Image (cartoon, rainbow, N blue to C red):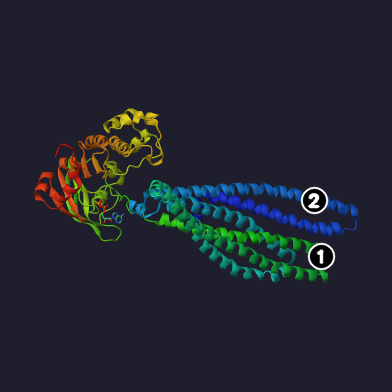
Amino acid sequence: YFRMLDFARPYAFKLLVVAVCFALAGALEVASLGQVQQVLDHGFLNADPVAARGVLIHVALTVVGIMALKGFFSYFADVLNNGVSNALVVDVRGRVFDHYTRLPLSFHSHQRLGQMVSRLGYDAAYMQTGISDVVGRVFGSGLRIVFLVAYIFYLNWHLALQVIVIFPLAMGPLYFFGRKIRRYASRDQERMADLSSLAQEVLAGIRVVAAFAREDHERARFRVVLKNHYHAVMQKLRMAALSSPVMEVIGAVGIALMIYLAGSQVVDKAMTFGAFGSLMVATFSLYPHFKSLNGVNVNIQNAIAAGTRVFEVLDTPVAIADKPGAKTLKAPKRKLSFEHVTFAYGGGHAVLKDVSFELKAGQRLALVGPSGAGKSTLADLLPRFQDVSAGSVRWDGTDVRDASLESLRGQIGVVTQETFLFNDSIAANIAYGRPDASRAEVEEAAKAANAHAFVMEQAQGYDTLIGERGVRLSGGQRQRLAIARAILKNPPVLILDEATSALDTQSERLVQQALERLMRKRTTLVIAHRLSTVRHADEILVLDKGQVAQRGKHAELLKQGGLYARLYRMQFADRKPRGKK
Ligand code: ADP
């Protein structure tokens, strides 16, 4: 919780104002209680009826005045307090989102999207309630309790001392409920994260769900998750509901004590009737504030559970960061080299073992190998989507780990099998890597990528909005947009993961042509699935189980026989353009 308050530091001054406003409002409320004694002692017990009436009118006006003033301060305190807590949540959400974007890709590949979104939404909201509520109630109710207790002491400290023993009695249950509620609150938040994960997953994969007619199954699965969440919430709420009467009974014991002790004093004529009245009103006034403090406990526990989950994210180290004094890379002049590279995912077994090769500037290296051989992993090491476990990746001799990420990734274009398109216009999607590009440049890139023609067929041309995940475009069209995106960025180095799925002949030809234009004059590392790619490669690296099995040019490798020849027959031979056999 204290770490959460850390977020509040920039708002310290505002919070101080909030506290002062709450304090003033509280003090005014207590002041109004003093009027009760006036009514009883100087009103009812006044021998002179005219004077008594005067006192009553005076008291009535004073009470209205006090309450109006109190309302004024309460209003300010509430508005400011809500302003601060909502601004805090903006900060928290901003920080978490920023952190998500900085976390290594390996983190993202192990996290469910729904979980991450849930932390941004649900958990941050709980933190907000926790903070605003605590500030509001601690200052509001807490200060009032202090004032009221002080007032009771002022009225009769003797009595107050006798009744105050009840406080320690309340601490035990308060602690007990706090712990339970926090446990149930974190369960509630986990179940909520499950819920959004599942919803997100099913909706994102709705085509698969539909294709396999698994709607009923998914609906049932979602019902289970909903039910789990319901149970978690109810468990928490039951505990919160139980805490309230328990605390009330303890409070009632205090009131009972006060009635008995103070009443006895009135009977013994040791206290005036007015003082007794004031004392009773003050004691009863304490009551709702105690209840409200118990409510704070519930919200604090909620917020702590949520805060723990949020801080878990913020505490995940940003593994790949620039070293101090990182070098700025320029387009490679000589070569990119992998030197004795070994890599393992998160402490697992080595996926790449002692891989060494060179890629001369301007040349094309094709990676070939059975699925799971480590081709994608190898390609991920160059832009530092992952860092090597041993060995090094060098860029004109500079270890990429000594370079700034921005300059490194600025030189590399990545075109993957799956094309992610943002929910934005076609032009904005093409210009994603260079938002400042002019419309003419965008069109030029689209033309080079064989995308211009189909873009012009769309209702609004380049301004056509692509639905989420680009559902309104065909696979080949999406690939060509991705190629246009890379062409526009114009990076000297290119990493290409060719699509394995075969497109129809016409689309295939257009994509192939676009790719050729994209690769021209660029240093290219390509995960090859197409025959023409391996044929035109300057060198082919055949990977098997994380090791280099063979290397050379297409013709040599075919002659050698072995893995490449086998792969060639399986992967490429059946894709030979018809008539060329
Ligand atoms: P290829 O691209 O040649 O099909 P990959 O580089 O994708 O091969 O995978 C190589 C090996 O690394 C496989 O055994 C795969 O299971 C494993 N692997 C890939 N990605 C991850 C990951 N994020 N975490 C753990 N293991 C992974």
Left-right relation of 457 to 391: right
Kindly tell me whether residue 361 is visible in this rendering: no
Which of 255/518 is in front?
Answer: 518
Q: Earlier in the sequence, mark 1 or mark 2?
A: 2
Category of crowding for the residue at label 1, using alpha-carbon neighbours closer than 10 angstroms: few (below 14), some (14–19), many (at least 20): some
Residue 323 location, x and y as percent?
Answer: 30, 51
The mark tally for this picture is 2
Residue 442 location, x and y as percent?
Answer: 32, 31
Which residue carries the number 1 mark?
272
Task: Indicate the amino acid at tag 1.
Answer: Thr
Category of crowding for the residue at label 2, using alpha-carbon neighbours closer than 10 angstroms: few (below 14), some (14–19), many (at least 20): few
- Numbered circle sitting on residue 29: none
Which residue carries the number 2 mark?
60
Q: Quadrant of ligand 1?
A: bottom left
Circles 1 and 2: CB atoms closer than 8 Å = no
Residue 562 location, x and y as percent?
Answer: 12, 53
Question: Closer to the camera: disc 1 or disc 2?
Answer: 2
Kindly tell me whether residue 61 is visible in this rendering: yes
Residue at the image point whose x is 34% and y is 31% from the top: 455
